[in-house]
Amino acid sequence: MRPGARGAIRHRRPAPHPEVHSPIRSSRVKPLLLPLTLALALVSSLPVSAQTADHADEIAALKSQLQVLQARIEALESRSTEQAAQTPGVAPAPASAAEGPGQTKVETRGGIRVASADKAFEASLGGRIHFDAYAFDRDQAATTGTSEFRRARLTLQGKAYGWDYKLEQDFAAGSNLDGLRDAYIARSALGGRFTVGHFKPYRSMEELTSSNEVLMMERPFASASGLFGGRQFQQGVGYLRAGGHYTAGFSAFNLRGASGTRNEGVGYAGRVTVAPIDTDEATLHFGGWASRENANQGSADLSASVNYAGRRGPSQAIATVSGASGDEVTAYGLEAAGSFGPVFFQGEYANASFGQPGGPDQDVVTWYLQGSWHLNGGHKPYKAGTGVFGSASAADRGLWELTTRYDSIENRDVAGLDVSSWLLGVNYYVNPALRFMFNYTRGDNGFNGDETGQYAVRTQFAF
């Protein structure tokens, strides 16, 4: 190009880039890379037809130098990342969502849940707080009204390497193993799910319903609140299979809870359910279950005992099998339940035989019928995978539910040994985590004539 020509572009070759001996953070390099790339793209886009031959030569030289500088910056950025990765305490800049294959997902909706990008590893931490207060309308039995934490649990569950796990501790039930609840590993196989560890045997519909979702503050007599007293969680193995409208589960277990003594007693339980109607607004459920518990060396006594006027109220023993006798308890039950719009009902009938070493077995019969009515549009959903009902969704509005239950248990081989109770209640769901419950329970002990009542309130928070 002629010196002094109009429009001439003065150009100087850039000085050689000095050798870099220390790590350069990618956050300092990337701001340089972006404008250089834009400049290169702008120069490349100039129309060749509008340039003189001299202009074209100068632009070509400038493009070549920009490309060299861009390559050097990219090399420096790569070297910086490698050096940072090899230097203790220095972490390379994380890749963005667009650069990486996926990110670990963290949710804090209620509890805390962490999942890997491929969902192969998950862990969640949740819990429940049930705080109760009650007072008694005394009759013959001595009772003390007070307040207490009915449940105070932390729950860790998730999956790893294709296995599910759950570990739950109830601090309101005692320390160490006294408060251990679910503690198991599980895996899907053969069309169902195998479980190994400490969990509830497959028996009694209301027993298998979560304590966060039971209709009244305490479960009926056809559960570990009566027929299976002290035997709520057992150590063993189980298999549960669920289809669109049915479930079938079987469990075999040692007669030992987590905090119990070592023994050689064994038990078996199985439950099947079917839901011939199951839509978003209507569900009809039927089920049946059977259980057999064989006492053996070291077994604790197998008893049925009930608090007929609410928790911490007066109790009545119904039947007992001595663990040292080696006898057994066999039981079976039938279930029926339905949820139709705002109306819900559920009932169970159970018959149990308690072996006696010095005479004939004692037959125990228990049954209950309970129901509820949602006052402002709630509906109890059905959990087809386990064959039980959950709680209505309160969403972000308050939900009111009226509840009632009649409960009865009788030892037919001991004259006058029958106990019953009727309950009235109100549940107020503030949101999906918070619920308030009120129950009035009136017990009637036909064996001693006691008729004690209880007023109880629960504040429940589950996360």
Image: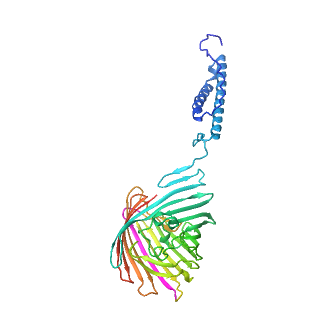
Q: What stretch is highlighted in magenta?
A: 360-378
98 vs 220, left or right, is right
Does residue 41 lie above or below 157 as drawn?
A: above
Asked whether 13 or 27 is in front, the reply is 27
Q: Can residue 456 be seen in this view?
A: no
Does residue 432 lie above or below 96 as drawn?
A: below
Q: Which colour scheme is used?
A: rainbow
Does residue 346 lie above or below 322 as drawn?
A: above
Residue 369 drawn in magenta: yes
> Residue 307: x, y in percent?
41, 75
Residue displayed at 51% across by 60% down: 155
Residue displayed at 53% across by 65% down: 182
98 vs 369, left or right, is right
Residue 394 occupies which quadrant of the picture? bottom left
Asked whether 56 or 263 is in front, the reply is 263
> Residue 364: x, y in percent?
47, 82
The residue at the far bottom in this view is 359
Q: Is residue 302 visible?
A: yes
Residue 248 occupies which quadrant of the picture? bottom right
Majority secondary structure of magenta residues: strand
